[in-house]
Amino acid sequence: MNRIVFLGTGGGRHMMFSQLRKTGGMYFELGDDKNGLKFVMDPGPGSLVNARSAKLKAEGVEGVVLSHHHIDHSTDANVWLDGLEKPFLIAEEHCVMDKAELGEKDYDYYPCVSPYQRKRVGKLHAVRDRGVVKMKGIRFEAVKSEHYGPTVGFIISTDKFRIGCTSDGRHYPGQESRYEGCNILIMNVLVPKGVEPEEKKHMSVDEAIKFIRGMKKKPKLVILQHFSLWMLRANLWKQEKIMKDATGVQVIHADDFMQVDIDKILSGNATQDDL
């Protein structure tokens, strides 16, 4: 079974601290036992605990994928890496490399993966925009995100499907062209329709509409997630309907512990119980 389980659909510091929406990232199970992977992406606070609550077999997870080093995306990366046996790690390079290694002086940051856990990783792939990693029939391509720290989204593909995960960041010209051909598009949207925030660092509903309209081949399904308190107050059902009406694409918002059956989405036979 190809599936995604949302271990938390909250984002930003206020949501992370309140836990009105959990902040555990996503669990992916792709391919089969002979040629496939099980991994977590952007495991923020509570990711492992949430995986146990969802009755997922944590010991079967093979690795971690990180889009950037902000704590609502990465704190449980060290937890997962500590418990897994020689896991793989695919991470935006600033998550694992310090300023000296990257030859940078001006940007003030620290890698979110500890040196100890970095040594325990079986296969480490530090990526930047357009970096590609291939593993057991799964292809990961990093796509630049325009956030306030170094960030990438990912296109995860097999010979059967393409899944886009935009991660954090506002829309920029040409971004949607990088996600062409994605069957499922997972978008981190933190700003409601009609709102212009003072700090333009996250995707808004207006920008997400522009993004989807700019795609020549629309995805079968768009999933909104990584919600701020702002988005919750604005009514998620209303926001997804606005996007659906504006784009003609099926749009849903994710809930904590929601499971997506990728095969049924691709076949067109998905019901609400499959989402």
Image: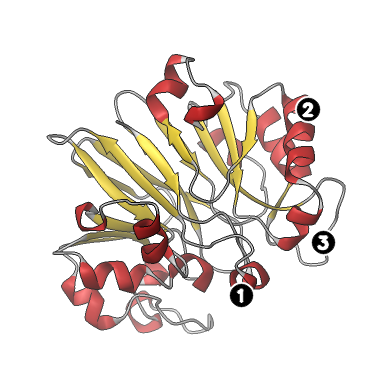
Identified by mark 3, the residue type is Pro
Residue 123 picture location, percent across and down: 18, 60
Q: Residues under labels 1 and 3: Cα distance? A: 21 Å
Residue 202 picture location, percent across and down: 68, 57
Image quarter where the N terminus lies is: top left
Query: Can you say whether 107 is above or below 151 in the image?
Result: below
At label 2, counting other C-alpha atoms closer than 10 Å, the crowd grade (few under 14, some 14-19, many 20 or more) is: some
Residue wearing tag 2: 246
Q: Earlier in the sequence, mark 1 or mark 3?
A: 1
Q: Earlier in the sequence, mark 1 or mark 2?
A: 1
Residue 31 picture location, percent across and down: 25, 33
Q: Nearer the viewer, residue 76 or 160?
A: 76
- What's the mark number on residue 225? none
Identified by mark 2, the residue type is Ala
Q: Residues under labels 3 and 2: Cα distance? A: 21 Å
Q: Nearer the viewer, residue 246 or 263?
A: 263
Circles 3 and 2 in contact, beta carbons < 8 Å: no
Q: Quadrant of residue 238?
A: top right
Q: Residues under labels 1 and 2: Cα distance? A: 33 Å
- What's the mark number on residue 197? 3
- What's the mark number on residue 17? 1
Direction from residue 216 to residue 248 in the image, left or right: right
Residue at coordinates 14% horizontally, 64% vertically from top-left?
85
Q: Nearer the viewer, residue 197 or 245?
A: 245
Residue 155 visible to the viewer: no
Q: Secondary structure at mark 3?
A: loop
Direction from residue 237 to residue 175 in the image, left or right: left
Direction from residue 178 to residue 200 in the image, left or right: right
Residue at coordinates 58% horizontally, 47% vertically from top-left?
255
Residue at coordinates 32% horizontally, 73% vertically from top-left?
78
Identified by mark 1, the residue type is Phe
